[in-house]
Amino acid sequence: MTTGFVVATVGMLTVLFLGDVVGEPGRKAVIARVPELKEKHALDFVIVNGENAAGGRGITGKITIELLRAGVSVVTTGDHIWDQKDIVSFLALEPRLLRPLNYPDGAPGGGSIVLETAKGKIGVINVQARTFMQPILENPFRALETAVIRMRQETANIIVDAHGETTSEKIALGRFLDGKVSAVIGTHTHVQTADEQIFPGGTAFLCDAGMCGPVDSILGRAIEPIMNRFVSNLPASFPVAAGKVRLRGALIEIDETTGRALRITRVDEPGPSEPASPEPEPKVDIEQAPTPEQT
Protein backbone atom coordinates (compact mmCIF):
# COMPACT_ATOMS: atom_id res chain seq x y z
CA MET A 1 0.00 0.00 0.00
CA THR A 2 1.31 3.44 -0.88
CA THR A 3 1.19 5.84 2.05
CA GLY A 4 2.26 9.01 0.26
CA PHE A 5 5.10 9.58 2.71
CA VAL A 6 8.73 9.91 1.58
CA VAL A 7 11.13 7.90 3.74
CA ALA A 8 14.63 9.34 4.05
CA THR A 9 17.48 7.05 3.06
CA VAL A 10 19.12 5.64 6.19
CA GLY A 11 22.88 5.86 6.47
CA MET A 12 23.37 8.56 3.83
CA LEU A 13 25.04 11.94 4.21
CA THR A 14 23.94 14.68 1.81
CA VAL A 15 26.50 17.42 1.17
CA LEU A 16 26.09 20.61 -0.86
CA PHE A 17 29.27 22.12 -2.30
CA LEU A 18 28.98 25.60 -3.83
CA GLY A 19 31.67 27.09 -6.08
CA ASP A 20 33.49 30.41 -5.78
CA VAL A 21 31.25 33.14 -4.34
CA VAL A 22 31.83 36.36 -6.31
CA GLY A 23 31.28 39.67 -4.51
CA GLU A 24 28.11 40.99 -2.92
CA PRO A 25 25.77 39.52 -5.58
CA GLY A 26 27.17 36.04 -4.99
CA ARG A 27 27.23 36.14 -1.22
CA LYS A 28 23.72 37.63 -0.96
CA ALA A 29 22.44 34.85 -3.17
CA VAL A 30 24.14 32.18 -1.09
CA ILE A 31 22.88 33.65 2.18
CA ALA A 32 19.35 33.87 0.80
CA ARG A 33 19.20 30.43 -0.83
CA VAL A 34 21.17 28.12 1.49
CA PRO A 35 18.35 27.80 4.08
CA GLU A 36 15.90 26.88 1.28
CA LEU A 37 18.34 24.41 -0.28
CA LYS A 38 19.00 22.78 3.09
CA GLU A 39 15.29 22.07 3.43
CA LYS A 40 14.77 21.12 -0.22
CA HIS A 41 17.58 18.52 -0.28
CA ALA A 42 17.61 17.55 3.42
CA LEU A 43 21.23 18.66 3.58
CA ASP A 44 23.51 17.47 6.35
CA PHE A 45 26.47 19.70 5.46
CA VAL A 46 27.22 22.75 3.27
CA ILE A 47 30.64 23.78 1.93
CA VAL A 48 31.15 27.09 0.13
CA ASN A 49 34.30 28.45 -1.49
CA GLY A 50 34.40 32.09 -0.37
CA GLU A 51 37.71 33.34 -1.68
CA ASN A 52 36.15 35.96 -3.97
CA ALA A 53 33.33 37.00 -1.63
CA ALA A 54 34.71 40.44 -0.68
CA GLY A 55 34.35 42.61 -3.77
CA GLY A 56 35.66 39.73 -5.88
CA ARG A 57 38.98 39.51 -4.01
CA GLY A 58 39.41 37.58 -0.78
CA ILE A 59 37.06 37.28 2.17
CA THR A 60 36.59 39.13 5.46
CA GLY A 61 35.73 37.92 8.92
CA LYS A 62 32.35 39.64 8.73
CA ILE A 63 31.44 37.90 5.48
CA THR A 64 32.56 34.54 6.86
CA ILE A 65 30.29 34.98 9.88
CA GLU A 66 27.36 35.91 7.63
CA LEU A 67 27.85 32.75 5.57
CA LEU A 68 28.12 30.54 8.65
CA ARG A 69 24.99 32.08 10.18
CA ALA A 70 23.11 31.34 6.94
CA GLY A 71 23.81 27.63 7.40
CA VAL A 72 27.17 27.11 5.71
CA SER A 73 29.24 24.53 7.60
CA VAL A 74 32.73 25.26 6.22
CA VAL A 75 34.14 28.05 4.04
CA THR A 76 37.08 27.14 1.80
CA THR A 77 39.35 29.53 -0.11
CA GLY A 78 42.33 29.58 -2.46
CA ASP A 79 44.95 31.93 -3.88
CA HIS A 80 43.04 35.09 -2.84
CA ILE A 81 42.89 34.15 0.85
CA TRP A 82 45.23 36.98 1.93
CA ASP A 83 43.69 39.81 -0.14
CA GLN A 84 41.76 41.34 2.80
CA LYS A 85 43.99 42.68 5.58
CA ASP A 86 41.86 41.52 8.53
CA ILE A 87 41.86 37.87 7.51
CA VAL A 88 45.15 36.88 9.16
CA SER A 89 43.90 37.58 12.66
CA PHE A 90 40.44 36.16 11.91
CA LEU A 91 41.84 32.81 10.73
CA ALA A 92 43.14 32.20 14.24
CA LEU A 93 39.63 32.72 15.65
CA GLU A 94 37.48 30.73 13.19
CA PRO A 95 38.66 27.20 12.28
CA ARG A 96 35.70 26.74 9.90
CA LEU A 97 37.36 29.19 7.49
CA LEU A 98 40.08 27.24 5.71
CA ARG A 99 43.10 28.36 3.72
CA PRO A 100 44.95 25.96 1.40
CA LEU A 101 46.53 23.09 3.31
CA ASN A 102 49.82 23.17 1.44
CA TYR A 103 51.17 26.50 2.71
CA PRO A 104 54.48 26.07 4.56
CA ASP A 105 54.43 25.35 8.29
CA GLY A 106 53.72 28.46 10.34
CA ALA A 107 51.15 29.99 7.97
CA PRO A 108 48.10 31.40 9.82
CA GLY A 109 44.98 29.27 9.98
CA GLY A 110 44.43 25.67 8.98
CA GLY A 111 43.78 23.72 5.80
CA SER A 112 41.49 21.03 7.18
CA ILE A 113 38.76 20.46 9.74
CA VAL A 114 36.54 17.63 11.04
CA LEU A 115 33.07 18.55 12.28
CA GLU A 116 30.26 16.59 13.91
CA THR A 117 26.86 16.23 12.23
CA ALA A 118 23.72 14.41 13.34
CA LYS A 119 24.90 11.49 11.18
CA GLY A 120 28.54 11.45 12.19
CA LYS A 121 31.75 13.29 11.41
CA ILE A 122 32.63 14.97 8.11
CA GLY A 123 36.11 16.17 7.23
CA VAL A 124 36.97 18.94 4.79
CA ILE A 125 40.40 19.56 3.25
CA ASN A 126 41.29 22.65 1.19
CA VAL A 127 44.28 22.36 -1.13
CA GLN A 128 45.75 24.59 -3.86
CA ALA A 129 47.14 23.17 -7.10
CA ARG A 130 50.37 24.51 -8.57
CA THR A 131 50.13 24.68 -12.38
CA PHE A 132 49.64 28.32 -13.48
CA MET A 133 48.88 29.28 -9.86
CA GLN A 134 50.49 31.94 -7.68
CA PRO A 135 51.99 31.59 -5.18
CA ILE A 136 53.44 28.17 -5.95
CA LEU A 137 52.84 26.17 -2.78
CA GLU A 138 54.12 22.86 -1.46
CA ASN A 139 53.32 19.67 -3.41
CA PRO A 140 49.52 19.22 -3.02
CA PHE A 141 49.72 15.46 -3.60
CA ARG A 142 52.13 14.90 -0.72
CA ALA A 143 50.28 17.32 1.54
CA LEU A 144 46.98 15.55 0.85
CA GLU A 145 48.48 12.11 1.32
CA THR A 146 49.56 12.99 4.86
CA ALA A 147 46.37 14.89 5.74
CA VAL A 148 44.04 12.15 4.50
CA ILE A 149 45.83 9.41 6.45
CA ARG A 150 45.50 11.50 9.61
CA MET A 151 41.87 12.45 8.95
CA ARG A 152 40.74 8.88 8.21
CA GLN A 153 41.59 8.00 11.80
CA GLU A 154 38.54 10.15 12.70
CA THR A 155 36.23 9.73 9.71
CA ALA A 156 35.98 8.18 6.26
CA ASN A 157 33.64 10.98 5.11
CA ILE A 158 36.06 13.48 3.57
CA ILE A 159 35.46 16.25 1.01
CA VAL A 160 38.41 17.91 -0.75
CA ASP A 161 38.27 21.37 -2.36
CA ALA A 162 40.96 21.25 -5.06
CA HIS A 163 41.54 24.89 -5.96
CA GLY A 164 43.40 25.01 -9.26
CA GLU A 165 43.63 26.33 -12.79
CA THR A 166 44.18 23.24 -14.95
CA THR A 167 41.78 20.39 -15.52
CA SER A 168 44.66 17.92 -15.78
CA GLU A 169 46.04 18.64 -12.31
CA LYS A 170 42.61 18.54 -10.68
CA ILE A 171 41.74 15.25 -12.41
CA ALA A 172 45.11 13.85 -11.30
CA LEU A 173 44.33 14.89 -7.71
CA GLY A 174 40.95 13.17 -7.96
CA ARG A 175 42.47 9.96 -9.30
CA PHE A 176 45.23 10.09 -6.68
CA LEU A 177 42.62 10.26 -3.91
CA ASP A 178 40.20 7.72 -5.37
CA GLY A 179 39.08 5.35 -2.63
CA LYS A 180 40.65 7.53 0.07
CA VAL A 181 38.12 10.39 0.23
CA SER A 182 34.41 10.78 -0.49
CA ALA A 183 34.68 13.58 -3.04
CA VAL A 184 37.14 15.86 -4.81
CA ILE A 185 35.52 19.04 -6.13
CA GLY A 186 37.53 21.57 -8.13
CA THR A 187 37.24 25.33 -7.75
CA HIS A 188 38.94 28.50 -9.09
CA THR A 189 37.99 28.79 -12.78
CA HIS A 190 34.40 29.98 -12.09
CA VAL A 191 33.16 27.81 -15.01
CA GLN A 192 31.17 24.71 -14.08
CA THR A 193 32.34 21.57 -15.86
CA ALA A 194 30.10 18.71 -17.00
CA ASP A 195 32.32 15.78 -15.96
CA GLU A 196 30.68 14.77 -12.69
CA GLN A 197 31.39 11.10 -12.00
CA ILE A 198 32.23 8.54 -9.35
CA PHE A 199 35.64 6.93 -9.76
CA PRO A 200 36.05 3.13 -9.32
CA GLY A 201 37.19 3.47 -5.70
CA GLY A 202 34.05 5.38 -4.72
CA THR A 203 35.28 8.99 -4.88
CA ALA A 204 32.92 11.52 -6.46
CA PHE A 205 34.58 14.06 -8.74
CA LEU A 206 33.77 17.33 -10.50
CA CYS A 207 36.58 19.24 -12.18
CA ASP A 208 35.09 22.63 -11.33
CA ALA A 209 32.00 23.55 -9.33
CA GLY A 210 31.60 26.88 -11.13
CA MET A 211 30.69 30.09 -9.31
CA CYS A 212 27.96 31.74 -7.31
CA GLY A 213 27.80 35.09 -9.04
CA PRO A 214 26.39 37.27 -11.83
CA VAL A 215 25.52 35.42 -15.02
CA ASP A 216 25.96 38.32 -17.46
CA SER A 217 29.64 38.75 -16.77
CA ILE A 218 33.12 37.46 -17.45
CA LEU A 219 33.83 35.12 -14.52
CA GLY A 220 31.63 37.31 -12.32
CA ARG A 221 33.23 40.63 -13.34
CA ALA A 222 31.75 43.40 -15.47
CA ILE A 223 32.10 42.54 -19.15
CA GLU A 224 33.39 45.77 -20.71
CA PRO A 225 36.53 46.36 -18.57
CA ILE A 226 37.81 42.81 -19.06
CA MET A 227 36.98 42.78 -22.76
CA ASN A 228 38.80 46.10 -23.20
CA ARG A 229 41.79 44.78 -21.26
CA PHE A 230 42.15 41.91 -23.71
CA VAL A 231 41.85 44.34 -26.63
CA SER A 232 44.14 47.10 -25.36
CA ASN A 233 46.51 45.34 -22.91
CA LEU A 234 46.16 48.43 -20.70
CA PRO A 235 45.74 48.17 -16.89
CA ALA A 236 42.16 48.34 -15.64
CA SER A 237 39.98 47.63 -12.63
CA PHE A 238 37.50 44.79 -12.86
CA PRO A 239 34.36 45.57 -10.81
CA VAL A 240 31.97 42.78 -9.89
CA ALA A 241 29.08 42.60 -12.38
CA ALA A 242 25.41 43.26 -11.58
CA GLY A 243 22.25 41.47 -12.65
CA LYS A 244 20.81 38.03 -12.14
CA VAL A 245 22.83 35.48 -10.19
CA ARG A 246 23.09 31.71 -10.27
CA LEU A 247 24.47 29.34 -7.67
CA ARG A 248 26.53 26.50 -9.09
CA GLY A 249 28.15 23.54 -7.44
CA ALA A 250 27.53 19.89 -6.65
CA LEU A 251 25.25 17.76 -4.51
CA ILE A 252 26.98 14.67 -3.14
CA GLU A 253 25.36 11.70 -1.41
CA ILE A 254 27.72 9.61 0.72
CA ASP A 255 27.41 6.26 2.48
CA GLU A 256 28.12 7.44 6.02
CA THR A 257 29.54 4.09 7.13
CA THR A 258 32.06 3.61 4.32
CA GLY A 259 32.63 7.17 3.09
CA ARG A 260 32.00 6.06 -0.50
CA ALA A 261 30.04 8.41 -2.74
CA LEU A 262 26.70 7.07 -3.90
CA ARG A 263 25.72 9.91 -6.21
CA ILE A 264 26.95 13.27 -7.47
CA THR A 265 24.74 15.79 -9.25
CA ARG A 266 25.60 19.22 -10.62
CA VAL A 267 23.78 22.13 -8.98
CA ASP A 268 22.60 25.17 -10.97
CA GLU A 269 20.14 27.20 -8.90
CA PRO A 270 18.80 30.73 -9.44
CA GLY A 271 19.71 33.45 -6.98
CA PRO A 272 17.21 35.77 -5.31
CA SER A 273 14.58 37.25 -7.62
CA GLU A 274 15.77 40.82 -7.04
CA PRO A 275 18.93 41.62 -9.06
CA ALA A 276 21.94 42.78 -7.08
CA SER A 277 23.41 46.26 -7.65
CA PRO A 278 26.93 46.70 -9.07
CA GLU A 279 29.75 46.42 -6.57
CA PRO A 280 33.04 48.31 -7.01
CA GLU A 281 36.26 46.38 -6.84
CA PRO A 282 38.24 46.89 -3.61
CA LYS A 283 40.86 49.60 -3.98
CA VAL A 284 44.18 48.24 -5.18
CA ASP A 285 47.20 49.71 -6.90
CA ILE A 286 46.21 49.72 -10.57
CA GLU A 287 49.70 48.56 -11.50
CA GLN A 288 49.09 45.54 -9.28
CA ALA A 289 45.65 44.84 -10.79
CA PRO A 290 45.27 41.16 -11.75
CA THR A 291 45.06 40.09 -15.35
CA PRO A 292 41.71 38.70 -16.52
CA GLU A 293 43.23 35.21 -16.32
CA GLN A 294 44.10 35.77 -12.63
CA THR A 295 40.57 36.80 -11.66
Image: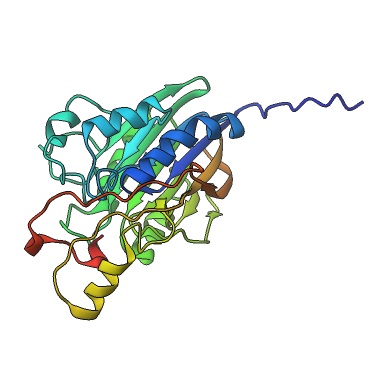
- Residue lying farthest top? 118
> From this viewpoint, is residue 7 visible?
yes
In the image, residue 259 above or below residue 144: above
Count of residue discs: 0
Whole-percent x and y of residue 78?
Answer: 26, 48
Please name whichever residue, 156 or 214, is drawn nearer the observer in this view of the structure: 214
Whole-percent x and y of residue 164?
Answer: 31, 57
> From this viewpoint, is residue 257 visible?
no
Please name whichever residue, 74 or 169, is drawn nearer the observer in this view of the structure: 74
In the image, residue 288 above or below residue 93: below
Residue at 51% x, 19% y: name it.
Answer: 118
Q: Which of the 4 quarters of the picture holds residue 222?
A: bottom left
Whole-percent x and y of residue 50?
Answer: 31, 42
Which quarter of the rendered picture does the C terminus lie within? bottom left
Which quarter of the rendered picture does the N terminus lie within? top right
Whole-percent x and y of residue 24?
Answer: 32, 43
In the image, residue 181 above or below residue 243: above
Horizontal arrangement in the rendering, residue 207 relative to residue 150 (left or right): right
- Residue lying farthest right? 1
Please name whichever residue, 3 or 200, is drawn nearer the observer in this view of the structure: 3
- Residue lying farthest bottom? 231
Q: How is the image coloured?
A: rainbow
Residue at 30% x, 39% y: name it.
Answer: 147
Residue at 17% x, 66% y: name it.
Answer: 236
Horizontal arrangement in the rendering, residue 41 relative to residue 241 (left or right): right
